[in-house]
Amino acid sequence: MKRTLIKNIAQHITETIRIEGWVDVARDQGKMAFFDFRDATGKVQGVVFGKPDVLEIAKTLRPEWVVAITGIVNQRPEKMVKEGVQNGNVEIEITGIEILNKAETPVFEITESTVDINEEVRIKNRYLDLRTERMHNNIMMRHRVAKLCRDYLDDQGFLEIETPILTKSTPEGARDYVVPARLSPHQFYALPQSPQQYKQLLMAGGMERYFQFARCMRDEDLRGDRQPEFTQLDMEMSFVNEDDIMELNENMLINIVRKLYPEKRIQQIPFPRIPYAEAMEKYGSDRPDIREDKDDPNLLAFCWVVDFPFFEKTATSDDPQAIGEWTFTHNPFSLSKPEHIENIKNKTNIADIIAAQYDIVLNGYEIGGGSIRAHDPEILKSILQILGHSDKKIEANFGHMLKALGSGTPPHGGIAWGFDRLMMILQNEKTIRELIAFPKNGEGRDPMMDSPSFIAKEQLDELNLSLKELPKK
């Protein structure tokens, strides 16, 4: 008999069906046994009575055993209907039980929220944690938001394009994770901190509108809204300005809330735009939490922070024009506001240069950031020189970008969302780990897989690597 999904059971009243899933709850009442069964689509109650051979098997069942149940779908008596509960109007009269797999007693209750369970225990047993209703819903909603974004961007003429995971290490920000290249001894790939260069190269390739859900890796200090690997909703567009990009992204976020989170209220539409200087003066942060009521879990206060300074001083000298004593506030591939382009070219009034950059902030979290890019290779080269890169290093690290931009690359810009962080806020969770199927713990380790881990000497030899002895503790 073909399997029926639990969500569809109510369509088969009086019919004999077969469901497959887990024992959620088992209750032995002597001559009868009651069960709640679940699969990925929902739950249903089943009962055994009047069938001694079936009852004998039923009394052996325990929570989390995997079973196939055959039975008749009966309408519940009116006084026993559970309003507002999935399958609250039906139950299965069980006529057959097949045990597909037994289970050891789980280390925590699957039928309850694990939010207060030790996180190390939860991550180590993540396959159990994912069975809980809260975690299942988190992952399901992540999928639904991603699908809405894909459909929305497809309607707007975007192409979903994958970019490489093995790439080149360049000095752009956080530490890279590096991968030894066996066929090129003593050389390394880097795992991407973001697809920044590739998405601009796609614009050079005439793709015009690109997006992907990109896996990004950064070797940086961890906290509740950071992970060694995370997901960005990354996009780039040609022939656009800041307003075009912000309008498209604002509309997509509004669509997400209205279609998938109708219980939530957006505080202000259109989203307010707050200059960086005003945000720092008024809120003391470039990620201002502008909610009118911070105790309302369903209030979403979006805002754009704009007009960022392009450069920040990194040295203590008093020379405001000193080359090499600056770092970028977002990334080195950004463009300034049009009125400051000459200052970049001439390397003058560096502290006053305003970038064509924008962050989208939600309830005090930066959930995305982007900019119009420097599509002129000479402007990008000037930016890198202001940051202190020699011409030799510019050629070694960014020569491929300069060459591509000089091939006839259109004006372009984009944005990247911290997708895990957005989902954390929408789902009213406290860390992004609650929205990632298999996260690392707070120390960057995966206790379930026991990684990172040591590798055999034979692997090191094959990679032409040797390890320094660790300092004694």
Image: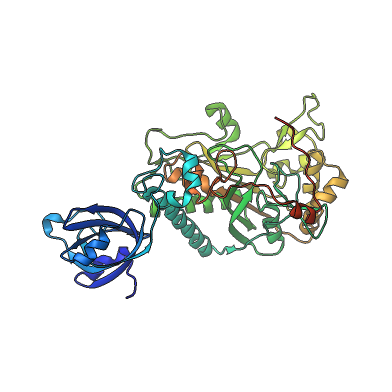
Report x, y in % for residue 139: 45, 53
Q: Is residue 28 above or below residue 319?
A: below
The vertical placement of 169 against 276, above or below, is below
Residue 457 is situated, as x and y percent measured from the top left of the image, at 75, 51
| Residue for point 57% across, 46% down | 446
Asked if residue 380 can be seen in this view, the reply is yes
* Viewer-closest of 201 and 188: 188
Residue 48 locus on image (x, y percent): 20, 62
**Left or right position of 427 against 411:** left
Residue at image point 73% right, 55% down: 167
Nearer the observer, 420 or 363: 420
Task: Kindly identify the residue that appears in the image at 82 percent across and 35 percent down.
Answer: 323
List x then y, in percent, for residue 28: 22, 53
Q: Is residue 39 left or right of residue 27?
A: right
Q: Left or right? Give the position of 262 relative to 15.
A: right
Residue farthest along the right direction in this orientation: 392
Is residue 84 at all visible to an observer of this figure? no
Q: Nearer the viewer, residue 458 or 399?
A: 458
- State the quadrant of the N terminus: bottom left
Q: Is residue 411 left or right of residue 81?
A: right
- Quadrant including the C terminus: top right
